[in-house]
Amino acid sequence: MRLLKKELPSLLVITDVCLCEYMEHGHCGIVGVERRPPARRDGKHAVPEAGAPVKILNDPSLKLLARAAASHAEAGADIVAPSDMMDGRVRAIRAELDRTGFADTPIMSYAAKFASAFYGPFREAAESAPKFGDRRSYQMNPANANEALREVALDIQEGADIVMVKPALACLDLIYRVKTEFGYPTAAYAVSGEHAMIKAAAANGWIDERAVTLESLLVMRRAGADILITYAAADAARWLKAG
């Protein structure tokens, strides 16, 4: 970030605030594991058996997330975007940013983030899948739209400046409902699985990559998204410039 802001000072930098890349277990917060049956030993570490419930320690995780967000702002981030889905993280981050002199740094919250199969290609590329268990205890059930709206409302109350729905194409109904109900700046995240499906179908000659990509982004915008986050950003910019 420091190099980017030095070389490209007008570039808007938004950072993903999470802990999963820095935890050996790959979860988005501090983990306490209910060991039933008892965990086996792997060297000096306890490793949960398959199927052992994963318990995220929400409140202790907030302190680390807040410190991480402040470090991003100090390094030059223009906007911080917490993606962890811990309860209360927006309030904790807002308080820490204000305390450390970054009261003007906005927060773009991953407010409605589902435990989705569409994240697969990214997790494989980034080697970011959890070492055990899954993220369903803190990311949302794709079947529960009402919970998503409650999560968005809470993040707004806690001080989020922008709210995000993820994944985008599978949640067009929620993008519409979030924008209609709250009228807040709304982002939609077109995730790796969406992008990979279009790329794969285009590579097989089944679809027109340009037309399908732009149409998929258009329907997200039509649903109410003010901001589109997509792996196709550079291609879309080039296509739109070409007319």
Image (tube, helix red, strand yellow):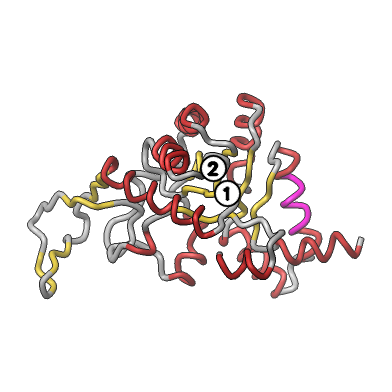
Residue 104: x %, y % from top left: 57, 41
Magenta stretch: residue 186 in it? no
Q: Earlier in the sequence, mark 2 or mark 1?
A: 1
Q: Is residue 2 in sight in this rendering?
A: yes
Under mark 2, the amino acid is: Ile
Q: Which residues are magenta?
A: 213-219
Under mark 1, the amino acid is: Ile
**Do the residues under discs 2 and 1 have CB atoms within 8 angstroms?**
yes
Marks counted in the figure total 2
Q: Where does label 2 land, which residue? A: 107
Q: Main secondary structure of the magenta part?
A: helix
- In this rendered view, identify the residue nearer to me: 104 or 136: 104
SS at mark 2 in the image = loop
Which label number is shown at residue 135?
none
Q: Quadrant of residue 129?
A: bottom left
SS at mark 1 in the image = strand
Q: Where does label 1 land, which residue? A: 79
The quadrant of the image that shows the N terminus is bottom right
| Left or right of residue 42: residue 184 | right
Q: Is residue 89 above or below residue 117?
A: above
Which residue sits at x=50%, y=39%? 111
Residue 215: x %, y % from top left: 77, 52
Q: Is residue 140 in sight in this rendering?
A: no
The quadrant of the image that shows the C terminus is bottom right
Residue 230: x %, y % from top left: 65, 57
- In this rendered view, identify the residue nearer to me: 242 or 109: 109
| Left or right of residue 189: residue 9 | right
